[in-house]
Image: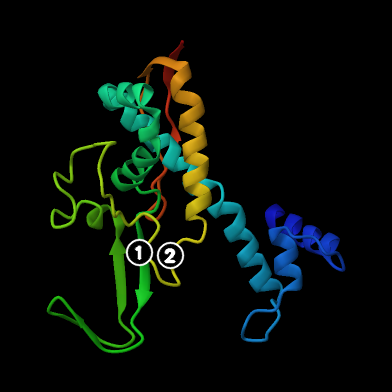
Amino acid sequence: LEVFDYGFKLREARRGKSENDLVSQLAHNVPTDGLALDDRDFRNYFLLIVIAGNETTRHAITHSMNALIDHPEQMALLKAKPELIPWAIEEFLRQASPVYHFRRTATRDVEMHGKKIKKGEKVVVWFASGNRDPETFTNPYTFDVTRKPNEHMAFGRGGPHMCMGNALARLEMQIMFTQLLPRVKHMERIGETDYLRSNFVHGIKRLPVRVEFE
């Protein structure tokens, strides 16, 4: 694929140089296990950097705009009180997580909430379900940009598997809505929403809208 060829060219261009970008880190640093990344490992990490920093955040922003179209009173509230935008970001991520699920493999026998999981069995975490757990969220099906606290699962919940790009994604979304919302007077859909056909990424391919600016 072209993206892999591009990644390998970047790696070769970074070799022997003391730059501090992510590709340089992959090219020069040796993981804690002492084994340098082979071509396959580099390719997989490079693809993760390209996709994780782009696709999921892009879909999260689109879902957020779609939700604000459905809830104009929430958009009006954010325009009047932009200090709420950081909390709104958390609600955007809760109500439409850009990833449907993750699967893990049990490394030992364990029992959780009365359910026995044996070593080697697969466990699937469905974010949409967890983000609407009535034991955690009051009125979980209500879209509320003022929701506090908002302990959603869009990035995982701590530990080594928590999304390492969560701070960047939050920052990108915060900048997007801080700059965009003051400029938007009215927005409405003018066609059908075209969703991405995927059992992993919760994405929107096309969202036709009409925007009236201030």
Q: Residue at x 56, y 53 (%)?
A: 51
Residue type at mark 1 is Arg
Residue type at mark 2 is Met
Q: Taking 194 as reference, is 9 left or right? A: right
Q: Residue at x 35, y 54 (%)?
A: 100
Q: Taking 177 as reference, is 112 left or right? A: left
| Residue 183: image location, x then y, percent | 48, 17
Front position in the image: 194 or 142: 142
Numbered mark located on residue 162 in the image: 2
Q: Residue at x 71, y 72 (%)?
A: 39
Q: CA distance from mark 2 to mark 1?
A: 6 Å
Q: Residue at x 40, y 29 (%)?
A: 82
| Residue 145: image location, x then y, percent | 29, 36
- Mark 2 or 1, nearer chain start: 1
The vertical placement of 171 against 125, above or below, is: above
Q: Taking 8 as reference, is 92 left or right? A: left
Q: Are marks 2 and 1 in contact (CB under 8 Å)?
A: yes
Front position in the image: 88 or 52: 88
User: Which class describes the residues within 10 Å of circle 1: few (<14), some (14-19), or many (20+)?
Assistant: few
Disc 1 element: loop
Residue topped by disc 1? 157
The vertical placement of 174 against 99, above or below, is: above
| Residue 112: image location, x then y, percent | 19, 78
The vertical placement of 129 against 90, above or below, is: below
